């Protein structure tokens, strides 16, 4: 029997000694964290049909052959260029050519861009087919592959078109992280820091204490890192699967400013985790102005971001990001809903913060 919503249970049976299998409440996703998972997916799913694989130019050649079988393989370009309506249209064409019908399954093999684009294709192909996520980056393993959000970018902003379509299974193989480039690996560390500040300050302390092994990519430490982040995200999304109650909005800590930085740079200068890190600093400065954090906490947040070689502030004037802030989905009537960190407790969503106060926090962070 599933646990009540928000409680995490181990699904049964774990296949290997070093695997962690997580599920929560009625949320339809089971997360598996382990080593060497890609060749044993059917051991968990007990469904033998060959998936249609969506990968990118690096993950396809690196990892696709580890899968037992596949019905087809579609390759996206690297980076945000792969997350657009024309690219999703090309996936549809490939699905049709491979005769993928309503009983088919798409397997997303890659980072967040692959997961978002493949997930959106799965949500909309024949009005929805099954989805498996095999995230190969730290950012995707700790965050984007879990929770069911799919989507693509428009010139007007990030993730403006999308759907909720949770994967049946998320297979997070930490061995994939050992080949990830340093710059890309740190993008996931920003999301891990976000969980520590936004959900559990004890986890932030664990990150501080284990920064060395994390940066060396010790597999036993990566198992703990990915599984703890997965637990926290599952718990939050199970409370608010479609962002209706406001609970899930806590996961947007640092993202309002972060998304605006990405968009203002044309999705070139700023990568997602770097932008979120800068957004976290702005949120912390805003929290200090509201009396939720002290200067000590702000400095501590800056130190852990620096330890992971992440930015500790934005790089462009307020006027550059303002047009993109105004298009953010969390703005209503020109007023933002912002996630504010609080000392030693979970963050909170505030919709009563005037834009000038956000500007002051932003400019203090420059």
Image (spheres, helix red, strand yellow):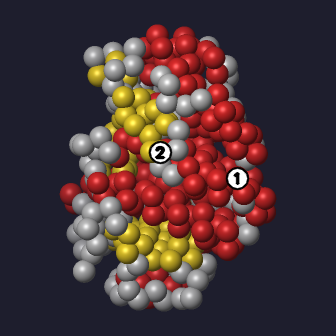
Q: Mark 1 — residue?
A: 208
For this rendering, which residue is in front, 63 or 72?
63
The answer to whether 31 is drawn above or below residue 303 in the figure is below
For this rendering, which residue is in front, 33 or 171?
33
- Residue at 25% x, 80% y is 1
Work out whether mark 1 precedes mark 2 in sequence or the reverse, and give the earlier one: 1
The answer to whether 330 is drawn above or below residue 235 in the figure is above
Query: Which part of the image, by quadrant, shows the C terminus?
Result: top right
Residue 175 placement (x, y as % from top left): 66, 72
User: 224 left or right of 156?
Assistant: right
Q: Is residue 226 visible?
A: yes
CA separation in Å, label 1 and label 2:
17 Å
Q: Residues within 10 Å of mark 1 (few under 14, many from 20)?
A: some
Please tell me the numbered disc located at residue 65. none
Q: How crowded is mark 2: few (under 14 residues within 10 Å), some or many (20 or more)?
A: some
Q: Mark 2 — residue?
A: 345
- Residue at 46% x, 86% y is 14
């Amino acid at each position: 029997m599933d646990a009540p919503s928000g409680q995490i249970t181990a699904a049964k049976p774990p296949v290997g000694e070093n695997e962690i299998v997580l599920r929560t409440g009625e949320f339809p996703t089971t997360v598996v964290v382990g080593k060497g998972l890609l060749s044993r997916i059917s051991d968990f799913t007990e469904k033998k049909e060959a998936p249609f694989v969506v990968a990118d130019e690096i993950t396809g050649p690196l990892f696709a052959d580890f899968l037992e079988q596949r019905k087809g393989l579609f390759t996206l370009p690297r980076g945000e260029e792969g997350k657009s309506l024309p690219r999703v249209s090309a996936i549809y064409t490939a699905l049709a050519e491979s005769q993928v019908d309503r009983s088919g399954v798409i397997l997303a093999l890659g980072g967040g861009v692959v997961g978002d684009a493949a997930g959106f294709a799965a949500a909309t192909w024949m009005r929805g087919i099954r989805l498996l996520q095999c995230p190969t980056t730290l950012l995707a393993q700790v965050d984007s592959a879990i929770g069911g959000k799919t989507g693509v970018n428009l010139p007007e902003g990030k993730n403006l078109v999308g759907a909720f379509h949770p994967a049946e299974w998320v297979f997070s193989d930490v061995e994939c992280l050992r080949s990830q480039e340093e710059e890309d690996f740190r993008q996931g560390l920003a999301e891990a820091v976000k969980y520590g500040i936004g959900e559990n300050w004890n986890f932030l302390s664990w990150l501080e204490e284990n920064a060395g092994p994390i940066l060396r990519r010790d597999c036993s430490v990566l198992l703990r890192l990915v599984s703890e982040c997965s637990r926290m995200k599952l718990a939050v999304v199970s409370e608010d699967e479609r962002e209706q109650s406001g609970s899930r909005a806590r996961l947007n800590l640092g993202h309002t400013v972060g998304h605006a930085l990405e968009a203002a740079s044309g999705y070139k200068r700023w990568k997602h985790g770097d932008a979120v890190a800068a957004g976290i600093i702005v949120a912390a400065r805003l929290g200090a102005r509201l009396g939720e954090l002290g200067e000590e906490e702000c400095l501590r947040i800056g130190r852990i971001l620096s330890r992971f070689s992440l930015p500790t502030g934005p790089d462009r004037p307020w006027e550059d990001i303002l047009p993109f802030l105004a298009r953010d989905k969390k703005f209503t009537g020109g007023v933002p809903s912002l996630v504010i960190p609080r000392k030693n407790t979970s963050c909170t969503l505030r919709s009563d913060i005037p834009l000038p106060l956000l500007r002051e926090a932003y400019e203090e962070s420059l």
